[in-house]
Amino acid sequence: EVQLVESGGGLVKPGGSLRLSCAASGFTFINAWMSWVRQAPGKGLEWVGRIKSKTDGGTTDYAVPLKGRFFISRDDSKNTLYLQVNSLKTEDTAVYYCTIEWVGDIFNWFDPWGQGTLVTVSS
Amino acid sequence: DIQMTQSPSSLSASVGDRVTIACRAGQSIGSYLNWYQQKPGKAPKLLMYGASTLQSGVPSRFSGSGSGTDFTLTISSLQPEDFATYYCQQSYSNPWTFGQGTKVEIK
């Protein structure tokens, strides 16, 4: 069974930093493209960014407004995805989900999703 | 970025009703459109990809249609477990973008 388990969320002051983790199991993580998606309280879904598999270059892409503060990395030896968030702002308060980005012959989609980890930015 | 707009933002319906949710893209995206269902306090779940291909395990009462800029998610006969928020998402051009969501509530 595919499992994605996020951790690392919590309360942080504006300007602070946090590293979120996503522990993956039940699939071949080294071959997977992985994304982070966030959801502010009571709001919709916002794609944060993704990292490709190393065989596909291991490159990262980010939502434009988040570039420069958000950094995605992976440790394939630990089957773990990371999201480093710096210079946190109150508007970064959200549940952060990790998800597998499936790359089909034609289409891409997100499935499944972890349960999410809540990041609260407040003084 | 490609803007995705869903309508309505919310709707009230009864068990057994036929429900239709619309999603419009800011530019043509072919059939690069996915649908997700999210229940309160839970992670989103993939319903459909490629505008009309049902994900394995998703009941056949869900269907999707459309291409270009206009898409539709239809639930043929609403069941109690279908009350949730539904999101469309374009996979045509990175950065991936989502619609704002449509909340389906019990009438």
Image: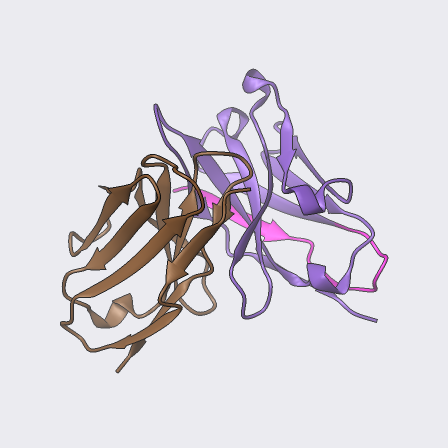
Chain colours: A purple, B brown
Q: Position of residue B56 (x, y in %)?
A: 25, 43
Image quarter in which the C terminus of chain B is found: bottom left
From the viewer's side, name the closer residue of B72 and A60: B72
Question: Residue A49 at what x, y percent from top left?
Answer: 61, 40
* Quarter of image, res A39: bottom right
| Relative to A81, A16 lies left or right | right
Query: Picture coordinates of residue B39 (x, y %)?
Result: 39, 66
Task: Name the residue furthest front.
Answer: B27
Count of marks, rendered view: 0
Residue B48 image-quadrant placement: top left
* Residue drawn at point x = 86 percent, y = 57 percent: A15
Q: Residue at x 39, y 38 (%)?
A: B28
Is there any visible trace of residue A114 in the rendered image? yes
Residue A58 image position (x, y, % from top left): 62, 23
Camera sees residue B56: no
* Residue A47 among those drawn in magenta: no
Q: Quadrant of the N terminus of chain B?
A: top right
Q: Residue at x 36, y 45 (%)?
A: B34
Asked whether residue A9 is drawn in magenta, I would say yes
Q: Quadrant of residue B49?
A: top left
- Tell me: residue B9, above or below residue A58: below
Q: Is residue A117 left or right of residue B24?
A: right
Query: Relative to the observer, which residue lies in front, A107 or A64?
Result: A64
Q: Residue at x 47, y 60 (%)?
A: B100
Which residues lie in the magenta part?
A1-18
